[in-house]
Image (cartoon, rainbow, N blue to C red):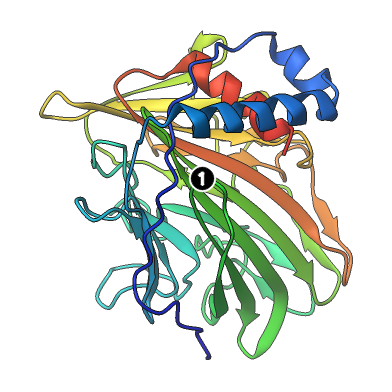
Amino acid sequence: MKIPQFGSQVAIRDSTASDGLRATGSDRAWRDAPAGLWRTRATATLALIALAGGCATSNLHLVQSPDAVTIGSDSAQPAVTYRLRPPPGSGLVIESGGYFHPLTTPRGVVVTDFAPSDHPHHRGVFLGWVEMHGVRDADFWGWGEHAPIKGRRVVNRSIHPTRSVSGRSFEAINDWQADDTVMIEEKLTATFLPRRDFYVLDLSYELTPKSDILLSRWAFSGFCLRTRKEGAIEYFSPEGIVTLPNPSHLKAETDWPDAPWYACTVRLSDGVTIGVAVINHPANPPTLWHNHREVRMINPCIVAPGAVRLKSGEPLKLRYRVVTFDGPPPTRQLTRLALEWKGT
């Protein structure tokens, strides 16, 4: 496997600041507003951020090793790490790389979990489906109850840094392999944007199947963020605290309704509160959310409304925005970020 080297650490001096603009409009406005309108506003906001000069993270570096890509500053631990392969002795029950962990809040507190005892296949921020059928059957999620996980792994083929106006960005090319067969070629573009009061990680996936593939209907799987399992947890949507019951992993109809975003906060044993949100993109396929308090996951699931069929050579494009923060959820800013994300 050839991994292009980024060379020595390269610092960028782009200053970023939190967006002081307040969110306006409702969930319907987010869905129905013309994309061009929000694209214009997003561009203007980014320009204002650059002019404001309030630096959230200076000397931001993107560094690549044979096993991982890290993004962070000189004075702190990496804000986010993208793993090309699992570390030795990790306890992960599958062989796949292509996931993010650890992911931190602006204060440097890790918000993701990896190979926890209750679900040793969970791996920070990751993508996979629990049941795929094509020239081979495969479970790239890692459950292993309804399709094989042995020999099913996401293998990195190349990494390239890409240009970003106000953050650091890279492109990863991965093969979803079932034994010696490549079922899907993945192109991931990841961009890390440090704001004053929160971190933003933008993820754009382009998945090109090498043959026709059926993604079976399930209440869970797809894009997932797994949080730490300690302390009290609460979930939020643009409407406030979510009081819906936990969904059942066997009943897709129990998943939560689609929304621009869902977030959760975790109050740790030392009294510190951290949080993370996942923002959906309206161009993604129809989605229900398998957000489970006990399992500690945020999971916008495109196979919960129904099975998804992928045609050979026709890419499936998925886009998600992950936001980490300290303290209570910044509701207005999350809705603003969702409007901005809609315009990308």
Please say whether residue 253 is visible from this viewpoint.
no
Tally of numbered discs? 1
Instruction: Judge by depth and name the residue closer to the eye, 318 or 17.
Output: 17
Picture layout, residue 181 above or below residue 210: below
Q: Quadrant of residue 127?
A: bottom right
Q: Position of residue 145 (x, y in %)?
A: 55, 62
Q: Position of residue 32 (x, y in %)?
A: 83, 19
Decide: few, some or many residues near mark 1? Use Cα within 10 Å; few <14, some 14-19, many ≥20: many
Q: Position of residue 210 (x, y in %)?
A: 81, 77
Q: Quadrant of the C terminus?
A: top right
Q: Position of residue 73 (x, y in %)?
A: 29, 53
Q: Quadrant of residue 250?
A: top right
- State the residue at coordinates (71%, 43%): 302
Judged from the image, the secondary structure of the residue bearing numbered disc 1 is loop
- State the residue at coordinates (81%, 52%): 308
- State the residue at coordinates (32%, 46%): 58
Instruction: Judge by depth and name the residue closer to the eye, 13 or 185.
Output: 13
Is 181 left or right of 229, judged from the image as shown? right
Picture layout, residue 94 above or below residue 38: below
Is 160 left or right of 16, judged from the image as shown? right
Residue farthest to the left, as pictured: 270
Q: Identify residue type, mark 1.
A: Ser
Q: Quadrant of residue 17?
A: top left
Picture layout, residue 158 above or below residue 127: below
Please say whether residue 182 is visible from this viewpoint.
yes
Is 6 left or right of 43, judged from the image as shown? left
Picture layout, residue 72 above or below residue 290: below
**Residue matched to label 1:** 166
- State the residue at coordinates (35%, 36%): 56
Is 226 left or right of 173, judged from the image as shown? left
